[in-house]
Image (cartoon, grey):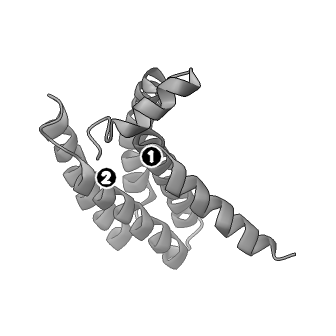
Amino acid sequence: MNYAAVRARYLDDTVRTASPATLLTMLYDRLVLDLQRAEELQRAGDRPGAGQQLVHAQDIVSELSGTLDTDAWDGGQQLMSVYSFLLTELVGANMSGDPERTAGCRRVVEPLRDAWHDAAASLTPTVPAQRGAYAAAGGVLGVG
């Protein structure tokens, strides 16, 4: 059995069928993981490995900023400013190889990740019939 193919299929199916709120929290979870890995690799002196993690983190922040509807809620513009700051810092952390700069990005992202998890949990219906209406409603949390 090709476990790599099975795992890839499972992940693909998970992403394709996830609600917008779930996708958002998945992105934040992976962003934190990328930052943790990058910081560890920087501290170990592995700049190429850290660079791969930081580039992936930049891709995630770019995706988050590209899907953010700044008019959907009052904090949209401020969150876009945070994303712009993070992109600048991630590039700088990669260029300098500075683990403290990477750690600073992680410290900004972790509370946001936790807040989005809390928001998503409050929006997710518990009754199966409501889930269909929830999915049909389209984008939530400023993500479409």
Q: Is residue 91 above or below residue 65?
A: below
Residue 70 image label: none
Image coords of residue 124 (percent x, y):
48, 27
Q: State which quadrant residue 72 falls in.
A: top left
- Residue type at tag 2: Leu
Q: Residues within 10 Å of mark 1 (few under 14, many from 20)?
A: many
The percent position of residue 121, horizontal first and vertical second, equals 49, 25
| Local secondary structure at mark 1 | helix
Indicate left or right for 117 with 87 as reference: right
**Image quadrant where residue 55 sits:** bottom left
Residue depicted at x 74% and y 73%: 4
Residues tagged 1 and 2 counted as in contact (Cβ below 8 A) = yes
Q: Position of residue 7 (x, y in %)?
A: 71, 65
- Residue sitting at the far right: 1
Residue 111 sits in quarter: top left
Who's the residue at 58% across and 63% down the image?
12
Which label sits on residue 64? Answer: 2
Above or below: residue 4 compared with residue 120: below
Query: Would residue 1 be found to the left or right of residue 75 on screen?
Result: right
Q: Nearer the viewer, residue 105 or 79?
A: 79
Dot 2: element: helix
The 10 Å Cα crowd at callout 2, few under 14, some 14 to 19, many 20 or more, is some
The answer to whether 44 appears left or right of 5 in the picture is left
Looking at the image, tell me whether mark 1 or mark 2 is earlier in sequence order.
1
Left/right placement of residue 91 relative to residue 126 reads: left
Residue visible at 42% across and 30% down in the picture: 133
Query: Is residue 33 something that shows in the picture?
Result: no
Residue 28: which disc?
A: 1
Pick the quarter of the image with the N terminus: bottom right
Task: Pick whichever, 128 or 4, lies toward us.
Answer: 128
Which residue is pictured at 45% across the width and 51% down the height?
27
At label 1, the amino acid type is Tyr
